[in-house]
Amino acid sequence: MAASFYWTDEDLLELEEIDRTPALPAMRPIGRVERESSPGPAGPHNERGEARIVLDPSLAEGLAGLESGQRMMVVFAFHRAGTFELLQHPRGDAGRPKRGVFSLRSPRRPNPIGVTVVDIVEVAGNVVRVRGMDAFDGTPVLDLKPALTKEAW
């Protein structure tokens, strides 16, 4: 069963009848991913390369405390994802049995949000140079968070 990336007004009215929880706040990107590697998906073959996370300059002060050598979580939008199916072949490989979308790292999900942990290479102004970013060039970045180790909890 395929579903649209966007909810229609009719869908939202139907949800309101079922679910009385408060609406989630709208999210705006705080920046974007820039990478010079291939224009294709940054799968395992590109994760080792470097990318830059370019923040809106008005948010640069929020990078204070981030340093080279630290690990950071990047929350981003799968802006090219389109529709989703609840059961998918891992990595689109029809030779592998389908699994539930919540057991996969597929970008095709009910809420097209991705999370990855990266290594910080450098922080300069409103740009964070990272290693391990598995997203397309131009991907909207929604948030950055420190990646805490188990010991830090």
Image (spheres, rainbow, N blue to C red):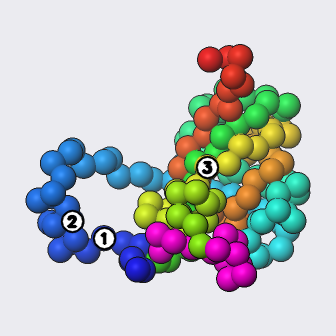
* Amino acid type at mark 2: Leu
**Judging from the image, what secondary structure is the residue with disc 3 in?**
strand
Numbered-mark total: 3
Left/right placement of residue 37 relative to residue 11 reads right
Q: Which residues are the magenta region?
A: 84-97
Looking at marks 1 and 2 on the same chain, the residue that comes earlier in the sequence is marked by 1
**Residue at 20%, 45% in the rendered image:** 21
What residue would you read off at disc 2?
12
Instruction: Describe residue 74's horizontal placement relative to residue 68 as left or right.
Output: left
Which quadrant, please, contains the N terminus? bottom left
Q: At 47% from the left edge and 69% from the top edge, which residue is drawn?
A: 86
Q: Are marks 1 and 2 in contact (CB under 8 Å)?
A: yes
**Residue, disc 3:** 115
Image quadrant where residue 45 sits: bottom right
Q: Is residue 146 magenta?
A: no
Picture coordinates of residue 107, whole percent (x, y): 58, 66
Q: Amino acid at mark 3?
A: Val
User: In the rendered view, does 87 fall on the left or right side of 133?
Assistant: left
- Mark 2 is surrounded, within 10 Å at the Cα level, by few (under 14), some (14 to 19) or many (20 or more) other residues, namely few
Choose the circle earlier in sequence order: 3 or 2. 2
Q: Is residue 79 visible?
A: no
Q: Please name the residue that numbered disc 1 is placed on.
A: 7
Which badge, 1 or 3, is on the more N-terminal residue?
Answer: 1
Q: Are marks 1 and 3 in contact (CB under 8 Å)?
A: no
Which residue sits at x=57%, y=39%? 59
Kind of residue at badge 1? Trp
Q: Secondary structure at mark 1?
A: loop
Image position, residue 23 (x, y; %): 24, 49
Relative to 84, 24 lies left or right: left
The image shows residue 22, relative to residue 19, as above or below, that is above
Classed neighbour count for the residue bearing mark 3: other residues with Cα under 10 Å, few (<14), some (14–19), many (≥20) = some
